[in-house]
Image (cartoon, grey):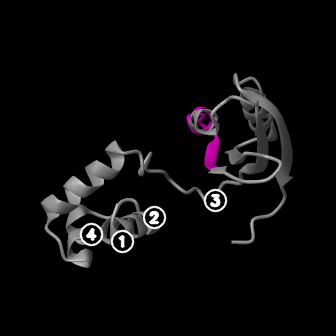
Amino acid sequence: MDGLDEQILEILKKNSRTSFVEIAEEVNLSEAAIRRRIQNLLNEGTIKRFTIDQTTRKLSSALVLVVVKPGTATSTISGKIRAIQTVQKVYEITGEYEIGVILGASTTDGIRSTIEEIRTLDGVEDTCTSIILRDLD
């Protein structure tokens, strides 16, 4: 990934519906080059999905910290967690916990079931969860 890919990602973060033509004009490349670069970002997993941000609907959110069992690759567990539908973001971190996860669901029951799903993953030793009360963005 180079500086142009980073520019493309920033444009898509602001508006994932930005057309290839508009992106091409903004970064001074051809539409075909943009199409190829975005496909490469999808293929390598840098772009995982295009989402809708529903600011009119309140979501329940939580921060889940995960301890990985000794001998288990942190990246393996991170990949399994990323595949869970209500997971918004996964971080590999340092300290007492190896993984930090941000969850978002329409109900606290949705949060609870996702936490249970994470806890049952083979290789997860322990979790610590905090419900997010307020987003300051």
Q: Which residue is mark 2?
A: 13
The circle drawn on residue 7 is 1
**Mark 3 Cα shell of 10 Å, populated few (<14), some (14-19), many (≥20):** few
**Residue depicted at 13% across the width and 67% down the height:** 30
In the structure shown, which secondary structural element does the residue marked by tag 3 occupy?
loop
Q: Going by the image, does 78 lie left or right of 13?
A: right
- Front position in the image: 95 or 128: 95
Q: Is residue 41 above or below residue 116?
A: below
The verdict on residue 89 being magenta is: yes
- Front position in the image: 70 or 106: 70
Q: Going by the image, does 78 lie left or right of 68?
A: left
**Disc 1/disc 4 C-alpha distance (Å):** 9 Å
The circle drawn on residue 45 is none
Q: Is residue 3 above or below residue 65?
A: below
Q: Earlier in the sequence, mark 3 or mark 4?
A: 4
Quadrant the C terminus occupies: bottom right
Marks 3/1 in contact by CB < 8 Å: the verdict is: no
**Disc 3/disc 1 C-alpha distance (Å):** 28 Å
The range drawn in magenta is: 80-90
Marks 1/4 in contact by CB < 8 Å: the verdict is: no
Q: Earlier in the sequence, mark 3 or mark 2?
A: 2
Viewer-nearest of discs 3 and 2: 2
Q: Earlier in the sequence, mark 1 or mark 2?
A: 1
The kind of residue tagged 3 is Thr
Quadrant the N terminus occupies: bottom left
Q: Quadrant of residue 27?
A: bottom left
Q: Earlier in the sequence, mark 1 or mark 4?
A: 1
